[in-house]
């Protein structure tokens, strides 16, 4: 009898878990890349974006770029996410999309990892690690990973930095 009750309980729990997975927490994102929960339970969502209308040179040929990459937050018990950081560089090449790829949050800083950007585009920072003040959202730090790759080429292969994970 215990085994039957235990099995029945497992089936009920499994059905509950499967049912919960059918509901989208956030929809309408363009190429989401990473999720992060801070200590307060806020969910950070990284969106690589969908490129854009401007053309540039990428490491492996022409690319399109735009400002469609962003970071969202979803507070506990909130009905909808809030756009936290917008206008980050997004790149489309060969039907793949690159932009912000990861986020980590400390007491003072929101760290955003930016994936590979165009090789000839110097108007904006890309391909690096950006630190934003948690209160003001002002940029406080930038680690230029493309400059490091260009100067050092650690793998002695193509010069193409594309960080994906912290």
Image (spheres, rainbow, N blue to C red):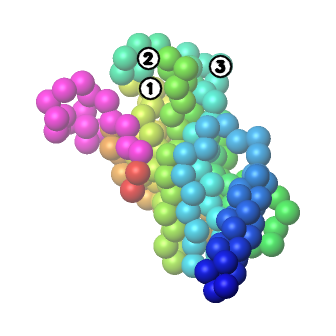
Vertical side of 114 occupied by 95: above or below: above
Q: Is residue 89 visible?
A: no
- Of the 4 image quadrants, the one containing the C terminus is bottom left
Picture quadrant where residue 55 is located: top right
Q: Residue at x 58, y 68 (%)?
A: 37
| Label 1 – label 3 distance at C-alpha | 14 Å
| Local SS, label 1 | loop
Q: Sequence-wise, which precedes: disc 1 or disc 3?
A: 3
Whether the magenta-drawn stretch holds residue 121 is answered as no
The x, y position of residue 51, in whole percent, is 60, 27
Q: Residue at x 51, y 57 (%)?
A: 103
| Label 3 – label 2 distance at C-alpha | 13 Å
| Label 1 – label 2 distance at C-alpha | 6 Å
Q: Residues within 10 Å of mark 2 (few under 14, many from 20)?
A: some
Q: Residue at x 16, y 38 (%)?
A: 154
Which residue, given by chain and number where applicable, does mark 3 sit on?
A: 53
Vertical side of 68 occupied by 53: above or below: above
The x, y position of residue 136, in whole percent, is 64, 67
Whether the residues at callouts 1 and 2 have beta carbons within 8 Å, the answer is: yes
Which residue, given by chain and number where applicable, does mark 2 sit on?
A: 57
Which residue, given by chain and number where applicable, does mark 1 sit on?
A: 118
The x, y position of residue 111, in whole percent, is 48, 60
Whether the magenta-drawn stretch holds residue 158 is answered as yes
**Is residue 143 found left or right of 7 in the rendered image?**
left
Write down the region rendered in magenta.
147-164
Q: Sequence-wise, which precedes: disc 1 or disc 2?
A: 2
What secondary structure predominates along the stretch shown in magenta? loop
**Is residue 82 found left or right of 151 in the rendered image?**
right
């Amino acid at each position: 009898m215990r085994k039957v009750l235990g099995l029945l309980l497992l089936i009920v729990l499994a059905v509950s878990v499967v049912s919960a997975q059918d509901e989208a927490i956030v929809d309408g994102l363009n190429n989401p890349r990473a999720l992060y929960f801070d200590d307060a339970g806020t969910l950070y969502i990284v969106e690589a974006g969908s490129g854009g209308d401007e053309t540039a040179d990428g490491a492996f040929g022409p690319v399109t770029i735009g400002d469609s990459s962003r970071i969202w937050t979803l507070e506990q018990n909130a009905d909808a996410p809030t756009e936290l950081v917008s206008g980050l560089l997004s790149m489309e090449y060969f039907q793949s999309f690159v932009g912000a790829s990861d986020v980590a949050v400390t007491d003072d800083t929101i760290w955003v990892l930016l994936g590979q950007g165009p090789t000839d585009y110097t108007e904006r920072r890309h391909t690096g690690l950006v630190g934003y003040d948690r209160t003001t959202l002002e940029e406080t730090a930038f680690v230029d990973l493309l400059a490091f790759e260009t100067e050092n080429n650690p793998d002695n292969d193509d010069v193409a930095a594309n960080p994906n994970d912290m």
